[in-house]
Image (tube, rainbow, N blue to C red):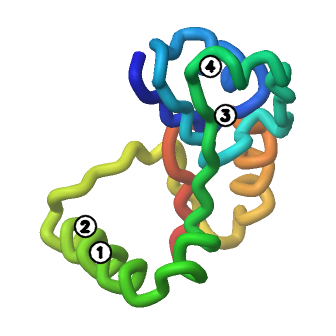
Amino acid sequence: MDIVLDSVGGETLQRSFDVLAPFGRVVVYGVASGELTSLPVTSLFALKSVTGFSLTAWRAAAPEQARQEMTEVADYSTAGQLRTAVHARLPLTEAAAAHRLLEERSQLGRVLLLL
């Protein structure tokens, strides 16, 4: 593989790195597993790379670009061109249950709180 987008971390990051082709790259943008993995220093000699991405850091580094691109994404969503999986829709009174779902990291999609 030439590129892997990893939001899990932990063992998945190690496996992602292992399947990269020479000059491939893993982009880490989350740690859903709750654990970081230390890749061995010798990994640096494998002609592969790992980099991170943070939406917060991106917005701080390029605020105008971030604002324009987030507006574009919002427009796609409003036009119905983006879809997302929804795992659960819960009333706001069940916010504690929603937090439990997120903390268990077992949901397969968004958890929505409804008014």
Instruction: Say which label, 4 or 2, has the lower sequence index.
Output: 4
Q: Is disc 3 surrounded by few (<14), some (14 to 19) or many (20+) residues within 10 Å?
A: some
Residue that carries the numbered disc 4 in the rendered image: 17
Instruction: Say which label, 3 or 1, has the lower sequence index.
Output: 3
- Between circles 3 and 4, the one closer to the viewer is 4
Position of 30 relative to 6 (above/below): below
Residue type at mark 2 is: Ser
Residue that carries the numbered disc 3 in the rendered image: 8
**Distance between mark 4 and mark 2 Cα atoms:** 32 Å
Residue that carries the numbered disc 1 in the rendered image: 74
Looking at the image, do the residues carrying marks 3 and 1 touch, with CB atoms under 8 Å apart? no
Looking at the image, do the residues carrying marks 2 and 1 touch, with CB atoms under 8 Å apart? yes
**Distance between mark 3 and mark 1 Cα atoms:** 25 Å
Residue that carries the numbered disc 2 in the rendered image: 77
Quadrant of residue 66 within the rendered picture: bottom left
Q: Say left or right for 2 vs 47.
A: left
